[in-house]
Amino acid sequence: MLYPLPEILTNPPRRRLGHQALVLNSDGAVLLLETTHKNGHTLPGGNAERDELPHLAARRHTETQTGLVLPLRTLLATDYTDTRLLPEAVHFVYWGGRLTRAQETTVTRHLPPPHVTGLHWVPEARLPDVMATHQHRLTTQALTALARGAHLPFLLRGIPAE
């Protein structure tokens, strides 16, 4: 006997899924984007498309915005945003790594899409000066998790993502 699917499966709620990368340069500064559509600087990243694997969404946005191709298989933080201003969202921050000088050159030479008006290396102490409060808190939590070694592998059906 087949049972009807519950409403949650046939008409799931709308929710944005944001995927960002925490990337550090060889001096420990954080890579941030300045964009035309957000207040303050943000980590590289963006929303996933329908049926796009989450870590690949983060990788796609990071590559488009910065020129870097990074594995992004480790989660440092997740953040829930309620519906006060936009549709509810869950944001994931992946560890992009500490770049070599050669990788830093890739960022310097990269021509980002028109909505990205700047790529900046910002020391941790200056993050509150250039980021919106919620983005700063999320980035600080990701940096704290990284410093403590408190990260999680990103899994696909229970298997670490490649």
Image: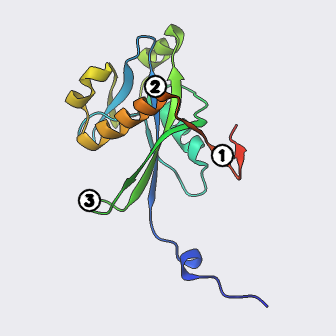
Q: Is residue 38 visible?
A: no
Q: Earlier in the sequence, mark 3 or mark 2?
A: 3
Which residue is nearer to you in this view: 145 or 63? 145
Q: What SS does tag 3 mark?
A: loop
Can you identify the residue that label 2 sits on?
A: 147
- The amino acid type of the residue labelled 2 equals Ala
Q: Nearer the viewer, residue 157 or 20?
A: 157
| Residue 99 spot, x, y in % from top left | 51, 16
**Residue holding disc 3:** 85
Q: Mark 1 points at which residue?
A: 155
Q: Which residue is drawn at 49% across and 33% down?
A: 62
Residue extending furthest bottom? 1
Task: Please tell me which residue is depicted at 59% across the width and 82% down the height of the picture.
Answer: 6
| Mark 3 residue type | Leu
Relative to 140, is 3 on the left or the right? right
Q: In this view, does 24 lie above or below 9?
A: above
Q: Residue at x 44, y 21 (%)?
A: 24
Give how far apart the Cα atoms at labels 3 and 2 are: 32 Å
